[in-house]
Amino acid sequence: MTDSLSLSPQDALVALMVTVSASDETIRTAELMEISNLINNLPIFAEYDSDNLKRVSQTVFDLLEQEDGLDAIFGLVKGALPDRLNETAYALACDVAAADGIVAQTEVRILEEIRYEFDIDRLHAAAIERGARARHIRL
């Protein structure tokens, strides 16, 4: 792997959000807007260079085309992300999945994988998921 595949903690969060968005093979405008809004507004991204978004996204897309690409993405993200940010990563992933008002079955499966890979307690995950639903509910 090259240096282009090394990620900062913020890159890792972005990679996970892009992975969730791309998981159903359709990256919806609402999901892209949610990723952009999160990057532009959350304190965790205060020092983040949003120009990295394109590079990180392309890395995710390239890896998803490979047979074990999802495992490679998880490896990169876990290698770059301190354990204390695992729930933050899951919360961001849930926000992206809920952004368009439809959580597709493929998104449900990727969220399950993220819970497993990042050892998110089931009760904590349920609370995070409920918060995402509450933030993205439509009338």
Image (tube, helix red, strand yellow):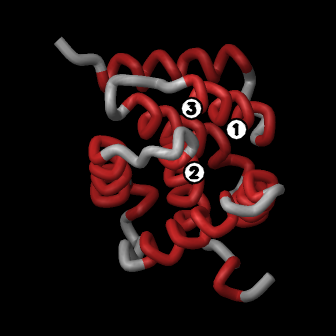
Q: Secondary structure at mark 2?
A: helix
105 or 115: which is nearer to us?
105
Residue 93 vs 57, above or below: the answer is: above
Task: Determine the secondary structure under disc 3.
Answer: helix
Q: Which mark is residue 107?
A: 3
Please say if 130 is above or below 69. Answer: above
Identify the residue at the far left of this view.
139
Residue at image point 37% right, 51% down: 35
Q: Tell me if mark 1 has few (under 14), some (14-19) or many (20+) residues whose alpha carbon lies within 10 angstroms of its own.
A: many
In the image, taking residue 116 as reference, residue 37 lies left or right, namely left
Q: Secondary structure at mark 1?
A: helix
| Nearer-N-terminus badge (2/3) | 2
**Given the image, on which type of amino acid does mark 3 rest?**
Glu
For the residues carrying marks 3 and 1, which lies nearer the camera in this image? 3
The residue to which callout 1 is attached is 114
Tag 2: amino acid? Thr
Q: Report, in whole angstroms, how far the alpha carbon at label 3 lies from the one at label 1.
A: 10 Å
Mark 2 or mark 1: which is in front? 2
